[in-house]
Image (cartoon, rainbow, N blue to C red):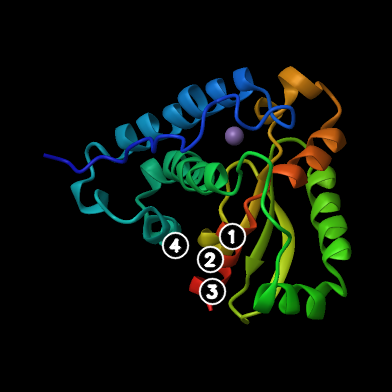
């Protein structure tokens, strides 16, 4: 019996992030979009037992060795599963206090200030043409970096460790914000769970 990937339950109510992110967007985004990535990933791996049951990050790290027939499906749906699993945990009702300690020091040393970091990250999110994600990652050089990826590409595919990410696909904001992606990005900062960001930063070093 194949070990299947599963849709993790949200740890807060669909309406808990309002007014930053509305309940209907959260429900469709989690249940339908993320749900579909999980189902399609399982379907892609159905006839490839050697590739089943791996931790999702390990699967994505090996994306270039995945059989060509299913590589695109694993890239899109495996990336979608990994990215969204992290994304729900990067959010919390009301947000939490800005970064402190080592994470704050590292952000300041790379970006000059937390505000400047947030601007760099927001610019990456605004500037991503079409669908994709903005990221703060710990690179293989052990340095924090901000960039964006297209579609569901995950930093894990290039051996970088995601510390914070923002989904800028239209499905993440269109019901409430329509074409105003910048307003969605601004609202995102009010619901960031910095404790989770800090935990990932510590674990990635
Ligand atoms: Mn999404």
Residue at mark 4: 61
Which of discs 1 and 3 lies nearer the camera? The answer is: 1
The alpha-carbon separation of the residues under discs 4 and 2 comes to: 21 Å
Say if disc 4 is inside 8 Å of ligand 1.
Answer: no
Q: Which disc is residue 195 wearing? A: 1
Q: Residues within 10 Å of mark 4 (few under 14, many from 20)?
A: some
Residue 156 pos. (x, y %): 51, 61
Say if disc 1 is inside 8 Å of ligand 1.
Answer: no
Q: Earlier in the sequence, mark 3 or mark 4?
A: 4
Residue at mark 3: 202
Say if disc 3 is inside 8 Å of ligand 1.
Answer: no
Drawn side of residue 26 relative to residue 179, left or right: left
Residue 96 pos. (x, y %): 67, 52
Q: Secondary structure at mark 3?
A: helix
Please report the residue visible at 31 percent of the width from the left and 36 percent of the height from the top: 42
User: Do the residues under discs 2 and 3 have CB atoms within 8 angstroms?
Assistant: yes
In which quadrant will I find the N terminus?
top left
The alpha-carbon separation of the residues under discs 2 and 3 comes to: 5 Å
């Amino acid at each position: 019996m194949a070990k299947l990937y599963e849709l993790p339950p949200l740890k807060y109510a669909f309406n808990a992030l309002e007014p930053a992110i509305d309940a209907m967007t959260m429900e469709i985004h989690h249940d339908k979009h993320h749900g579909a990535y999980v189902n399609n990933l399982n379907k892609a791996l159905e006839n490839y037992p050697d590739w089943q049951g791996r931790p999702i990050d390990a699967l994505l790290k090996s994306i270039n060795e995945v059989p060509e027939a299913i590589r695109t499906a694993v890239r899109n749906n495996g990336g979608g599963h990994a990215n969204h699993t992290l994304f729900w945990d990067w959010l919390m009702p009301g947000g939490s206090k800005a970064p402190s300690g080592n994470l704050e020091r590292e952000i300041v040393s790379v970006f000059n200030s937390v505000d400047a970091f947030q601007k760099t990250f927001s610019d990456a999110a605004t500037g991503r043409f079409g669908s994709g994600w903005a990221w703060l990652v710990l690179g293989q050089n052990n340095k924090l970096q901000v960039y964006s990826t297209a579609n569901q590409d995950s930093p894990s595919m290039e051996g970088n460790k995601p510390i914070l990410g923002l989904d800028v696909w239209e499905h993440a904001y269109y019901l409430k914000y329509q074409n105003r992606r910048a307003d969605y990005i601004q609202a995102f900062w009010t619901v960031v769970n910095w404790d989770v960001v800090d935990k990932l930063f510590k674990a990635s070093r």
